[in-house]
Amino acid sequence: MSPSRSDVPADVLAQRYGRRPRPEQPWYRRPARLAAAVVGGLLVLAYGGWLAVAQSQGPSFTEISHQVVDDRTAQIRFSVTRPAGTQVRCQVHALDSSSAEVGLVQVDLPASQDTDVQESVQVRTTSRAVTVGVESCSAVER
């Protein structure tokens, strides 16, 4: 009669098949792995917090309204929120029906004590635009 699996010692099977005995504790109960997981989690949280703070600083913009006036002109009204005393440069672009850029204008808002500023801009286009929008706003270094 051949021996059953329960009759064969575990180390013989491990030598034959290359298996290691299973750990007696799960990974989260081992101090080194638990510490590595905690440190990794804290690093991810710290990076997310830093990213949120870094992106919340600087000017922000809100589009209020836009209008396509004719085949060569579009108009937009937008507001910019910035720290007092900061000069801001905004890029405004007009797009046609295939989302190709048909007009671009750079708008400089001078530094002032006002934190919220509204601006109305006309954009000259090379062909009829279907939309116009603020692409970006950034603080200008003096």
Image (cartoon, rainbow, N blue to C red):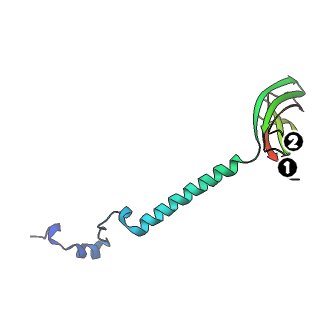
Quadrant hosting residue 113 = top right
Q: Residue at x 42, y 69 (%)?
A: 32
Quadrant hosting residue 88 = top right
**Residue 68 appears anywhere in the view:** yes
Q: Nearer the viewer, residue 103 or 63?
A: 63
Q: Does residue 96 lie above or below 33 as drawn?
A: above
Q: Residue at x 23, y 76 (%)?
A: 12
Secondary structure state at the residue bearing disc 2: loop
Q: Position of residue 33 (x, y in %)?
A: 43, 66
| Amino acid type shown at disc 1 | Val
Gap between marks 2 and 1 measured at Cα: 13 Å
Query: What residue does disc 2 label?
Result: 112
| Amino acid type shown at disc 2 | Ser
Q: Residue at x 55, y 55 (%)?
A: 45
Q: Position of residue 123 (x, y in %)?
A: 88, 32
Query: What residue does disc 1 label?
Result: 140
Q: Residue at x 38, y 62 (%)?
A: 28
Secondary structure state at the residue bearing disc 1: loop
Q: Position of residue 30 (x, y in %)?
A: 37, 67
The number of numbered discs placed on residues in the rendered structure image is: 2
In this rendering, the label closer to the viewer, 2 or 1: 2
**Residue 98 appears anywhere in the view:** no
Check residue 126 in the rendering and tell me which mark sits there, or answer none.
none
